[in-house]
Image (cartoon, grey):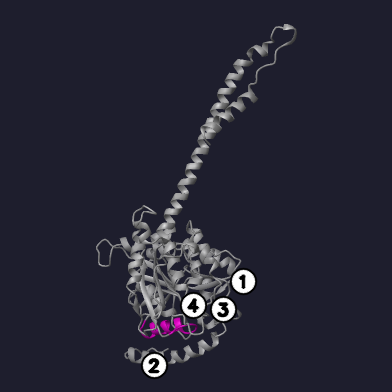
Amino acid sequence: MNDYTTNTFYTHWQRAVCHTLPPRRNKQPPLDWEMHFPKKCSVFKVVLSALLLVALLQLMYLSLLSKLHGKQQRYKYSELFETNSQLKRGIFQHQKNTRKERLKYSLSSGGIFDQSGQYRVYKNIIKSAFTANHEPRGSSDRTQQFALATHTSINNLHHLNELLGRWRNALSVAIFAHAQDVKFSTALIFALSEFCPQVQALVDFHLICHSGEIASFPEQDREQFAGLQDCQDVFRKLEKHRDTFQNYAMGRNVSYPNNLLRNVARAGLDADYTLVIDIDMLPSQNLHDDFLNFLKRRAPRPDEVFVVPAFEIRHTRKIPATKTELLQLYQVGEVRPFYEELCHKCQAPSNYSSWVNLHSPGGADSTELQVAYTVSWVDPWEPFYIGGRAVPLYDERFRQYGFNRISQACELHVAGYSFSVLSSAFLVHRGFKVSREFHARKDEENRLNRVLFRQFKEGLKLKYQDSTRRC
């Protein structure tokens, strides 16, 4: 709004509000209200002028804010996808983005091959502020650390949003991408690290693809990502990508290397204790702090892991935060043991009936986490557990569906580990697992991995020759 427009508006307003009084007939003397009208009008004009000035200042302020916001978004977008040559020419003048430079440097290394030579691994392509600043192992100032490790394909990365709402501590995420999703994954990982403060603070990312595929920073994808302005925009973009393919059905000759991903995510952490989960699971509220307080009261044995019972919940229900909330839903059938329908025996040794009926001194939601009972491993139990750094790695020969976690639990058993079930900690998977929702080749993959599991058990006899335990 310029000066001419403002003056014109003010003139019309003045005429409308304080118009000149019409002449009186027959030269009658003015009435009292007519004599006082000029004074009242003058006061009224001052008040309205002040209000008009305030309104004009507000309009100017909003206009400046709008321009500033637009400039900030163009700056943020330039950080994401402008090339170095454009920056040097002065199209966007700003400080170099160190996170972007680190990512480009990590990708330029070409990654490393896994043991099979079939996969290319880019470790720590994005490091969190926690990883960059924490005290290394061996430091006198370092306290015990407990972190979460998870894995996913790009179509399930949207679950990270909900996971960060529950877990606000160190988190390592290994992502598998194939074909055109390699570039898409690289761009979205970087966008998450730029727009999402909690991701910046806590999440380390690792990228895995086939050995014949090479990841690079997507310098030229301006149009595809022009709409990204904040963290929720990035997660909405990921949400739209969720139905690109079904889990484990990424292509006829594409195998999801779940155990390789688990190992990469674990190795990316410098924590004393780690819980490895699937990305579509949520831990109970305050599990991190409760477990560290538990360690202060009770020193774990070197050959002990701590089982966190796993459940699944109907899609429409809110994920419970505490054991009390979980038990209320469990009693009405809205929550049930994980894999209850698909493989009851795979989780049954956790002894859900005993866990549900525990009577802890502090009640169901006592913050004092305890060992409720110890369970002996039996085939085919595949518990989720918190383990120390010495816990054996997952066997990376297992891919796709079947025996990938059972094999690792089996090795723990043969290696002499005990399984202590925690009293009030738990995991919840959103949605009931049902057979009709799995990919078509599930049973075929399960049969192939069953054969591999037999070979794996024979190998354990040689690896642990002094052990009397068998799977």
Q: Does the magenta stretch include residue 383?
A: no
Q: Can residue 433 be seen in this view?
A: yes
Separation of disc 4 and disc 2 at Cα? 26 Å
Residue holding disc 1 = 333
Amino acid beneath label 3: Glu
Disc 3 element = loop
Q: How many residues crowd around disc 2 within 10 Å: few (fewer than 14), some, or many (20 or more)?
A: few
Mark 4 and mark 2 residues within 8 Å of each other at the beta carbon? no
Q: How far apart are marks 1 and 4 (CA)?
A: 19 Å
**Mark 2: which amino acid?**
Glu
Give the x, y percent position of residue 104. 35, 67
Residue drawn at the location 57% of the way across and 76% of the way down: 433
Lower sequence index among marks 1 and 3:
1
**Residue 13 left/right relative to 93:** right
Q: In whole angstroms, how far apart are the C-alphas of marks 4 and 3?
A: 12 Å
Looking at the image, residue 76 sits to the left or right of residue 145; the answer is: right
How far across and down, in percent of the image, does residue 313 sit? 57, 70
Find residue 26 and report its image quarter: top right
Residue 351 location (% of width, % of height) = 51, 77
Instruction: Tell us which disc is closer to us: 4 or 3.
Output: 3
The residue segment tinted magenta is 398-416
Nearest to N terminus: mark 3 or mark 2 = 3
Q: Which mark is residue 350?
A: 4
Residue at numbered disc 3: 340
What amino acid is found at the position of numbered circle 1 in the picture?
Answer: Gly
Q: What residue type is labelled 4?
A: Ser
Q: Nearer the viewer, residue 194 or 95?
A: 95
Task: Look at the image and tell me in which quarter the C terminus lies.
Answer: bottom left
